Amino acid sequence: MKYTAILALLALVPAALAEPVEPGPAPESLEARAAAAAPMEGSFEGLFEKRACKATKCICNKHQGQFCGNTKINKYCLDDHVYECNRDTGKACDYGYRTSCDKCGKLSC
């Protein structure tokens, strides 16, 4: 118990010895931050095209996820299109044409 005061003082030594920090540069403008956050060359950002998912009459099995259409099963699910199944409604929306769906009927060949 004798050393409690010494240990307490030792805990404060790093704070007492720390050097003051110089103020940094002013915060960047929103434009500068947006430019810095832009995708870098070689990133995956440019590989995928963002597309809206359009409502269709294509029905699905209520398992959330993407699948290639199959007109043999449902005439509203086009063979060369990729769909997203909605687990709540059992309806699929259409992302449009996909090369792998056209070639092999799968999300990737």
Image (cartoon, rainbow, N blue to C red):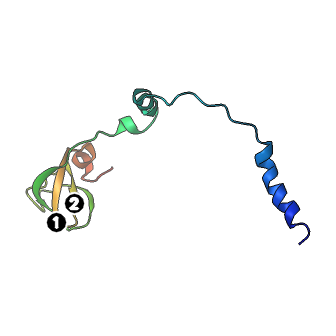
Q: Looking at the image, is 77 positioned above or below residue 103?
A: below
Q: Could you tell me if the residues under marks 1 and 2 are in contact, i.e. CB atoms within 8 Å?
A: yes
Instruction: Check disc 2 and report its element: helix, strand or loop.
Output: strand
11 vs 93, nearest the viewer: 11
Q: Nearer the viewer, residue 78 or 44?
A: 44
- Residue hosting label 1: 90
Residue 8 is situated, as x and y percent measured from the top left of the image, at 81, 61
Q: Is residue 58 left or right of residue 35?
A: left
- Depth order, front residue of 15/33: 15
Q: Is residue 26 above or below residue 90?
A: above
| The N terminus - image quarter | bottom right
Q: Position of residue 96 (x, y in %)?
A: 18, 45
Report how many numbered discs are placed on residues in the image. 2
**Lateral position of residue 20 relative to residue 4, left or right:** left
> Which residue in the structure is indicated by mark 2?
85
* Amino acid on which disc 2 is placed: Cys
- Residue 35 image offset from top left, x and y in percent: 42, 28
Q: Quadrant of residue 59?
A: bottom left
